[in-house]
Image (cartoon, rainbow, N blue to C red):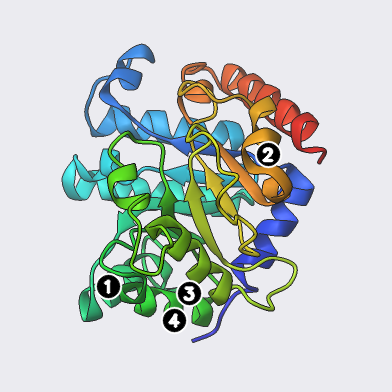
Amino acid sequence: MSSLEPFGARLRRAMDERGPLCVGIDPHASLLAEWGLNDDVDGLERFSRTVVEAVADRVAVIKPQMAFFERFGSRGVAVLERVVQETRAAGALVVMDAKRGDIGSTMAGYAEAFLHKDAPLFSDALTVSPYLGYGSLAPAVALARETGTGLFVLALTSNPEGPEVQHAVRADGRTVAATVLAHLAADNAGEEPLGSFGAVVGATVGDLSSYDLAINGPLLAPGVGAQGATPADLPRVFGPAVRNVVPNVSRGVLRHGPEVAGLRAATERFADEIRAAVGG
């Protein structure tokens, strides 16, 4: 199978050229209503493709949340296929936020759905869950290496339920989250300029000083904007790893629609604030 240049290298270049901002496409029913759209497939398509038109030629990453497309069945997934194709054609990288996680051939099937070059939903990276054991992700890791794609593995999430699993302490004294980060560092070892296996680390999780975020890979950071974190918080939260942070903003941009000009202006404000905060 022919492959792309590794995702980490492509992401590093996109972040350096366009800034590190990731814009999420989260077509909540409430957002569709704010835009004056119906909560149906036509509203979904109008919303999503307007976001792509507005920002895909100027941000590093777009992250569609698959659940909001899947809820409309096959027609919703067909909209997502067009969103992915148009986003990549405009030069942004697509991180598919599907949070897949399983074992064996089933995990391989999930990986093929998003990381195989001939798949209708072929994306540059996929979010995955390691909570069947990090080793359960091996089929996705292998396919990502083969195709030049990447993974973002849930590590330190900002939802209040997360700590009961992620902060649990193993027999060796390490937390589950620290173990996930250590596995990612191993999978990224020796990669330049950036590994392709990243962690999802919420910008609102609080003090991260006890965690080693130097995984030689990207850190996808939801929580900037409507969830309460600001670009100015990023250096304090992520410390020396801040240059590898990909801050995700969804509602903070999306609520400025439905006009393309409003979406672009909000995107540029966040991008400028993030560049100022991280020194890029």
The CA span between labels 1 and 4 is: 11 Å
x 48%, y 40%: residue: 202
Instruction: Classify residue 128 as left or right of residue 56.
Output: left
Observer-nearest of 236 and 245: 236
**Residue drawn at (75%, 67%), measured in percent from left and top?**
193
* Disc number for residue 58: 2
Residue nearer the viewer, 205 or 69: 205
Residue 144 is marked as 3
First of labels 2, 3 by sequence position? 2
Relative depth, front residue between 131 and 118: 131
Q: Are marks 4 and 2 in contact (CB under 8 Å)?
A: no
* Foreground: disc 4 or disc 2: 4
Which of the two labelled residues, at mark 1 and mark 3, occupies the earlier sequence position?
Answer: 1
Q: Is residue 47 above or below residue 52?
A: above
* Element under disc 2: loop
- Which residue type does callout 3 highlight? Ala
Which badge, 1 or 2, comes first in the chain's sequence?
Answer: 2
